[in-house]
Amino acid sequence: MRISSSFFRRDARTVARDLLGRTLVTVVDGVRTAGTIIETEAYLGSDDAASHAHRGPTPRNGPMFLEGGHAYVYFIYGMYHCFNVVTGSAGEGEAVLIRAIEPIEGLEHMRQRRTERAVRTRPVAARTVADGALANGPGKLAIALGIGPELNGEDLRSGRRVWLEAGVPLNDAEVEATQRIGITKSVEHPWRWVRR
DNA sequence: CCTGCGATATTCT
DNA sequence: GAATATCGCAGGC
């Protein structure tokens, strides 16, 4: 069952914790892929120097300021896209970065996308990507699920290309909170949640 | 196992 | 010019 409005209107940290165990689904180019969310990070609005929303709206971060329940997809390192779930109320600028999923549907399509995509100038070496490595990072996850800039700003509550389903929420004993990865500002907050 | 680095484009200083 | 919410490969242990 698709997750709806009230889930997303809460604080980004609450939503990030609650997203673990939920199911992320995409239907792109007629291909359905899905996975269980196993790693998330919360990014707040003005009070979080690591957040894209820290200095207010810009052309890039605009979708972050939509009402909770939209997608924010940004381009990073000139090469990758990252998928975020916008949370809170319109104008707040909060979002949750989905950092990893456990693939559950469409694994061969994920593998094909991850293999055919030349990350380096040179073609990617012919190799088999292990199941566990298909979507165990924000850039990999976007490639595996077919997420690109065309999904930026999509409404997850009614969209036809990307949405969230209830899945099986995790107990506190199954969840660990740590500092966020890959940032240099506001590093002290334990706003990353991961399945043990 | 680990550490370091290049690729690549947009944003920020 | 520098930094960036990344990734995969090379090289050393």
Image (spheres, coloured by chain):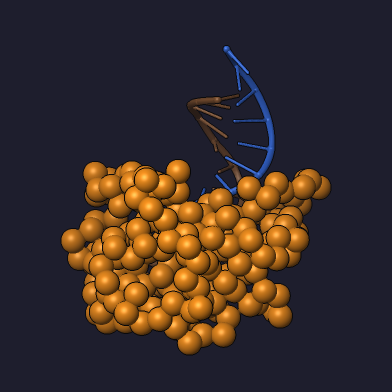
Chain colours: A orange, B brown, C blue
The spot of residue A77 in percent (x, y) is 50, 55
- Residue visible at 70% across and 75% down? A31
Horizontal side of residue C3 vs A137, given as left or right: left
Q: Nearer the viewer, residue A181 or A185?
A: A181
* Residue under the point 33% across and 65% down: A15
Is A30 situated left or right of A20 in this image?
right
Q: Position of residue A135 (x, y in %)?
A: 59, 55
Q: Residue A13 falls in which quadrant of the image?
A: bottom left
Residue A38 is left or right of residue A30, and the answer is: left
Q: Is residue A36 visible?
A: yes
Q: Position of residue A56 (x, y in %)?
A: 24, 72
Q: Looking at the picture, how far across and down is residue A92, in whole percent?
A: 24, 74
Q: Name which residue lies at 61% across and 67% down.
A: A34
Q: Quadrant of the C terminus of chain A?
A: top left
Give the quarter of the image for residue A91: bottom left
Which of the 4 image quarters holds residue A147? bottom right
Q: Would you say A11 lies left or right of A19 here? A: left
Q: Nearer the viewer, residue A98 or C12?
A: A98
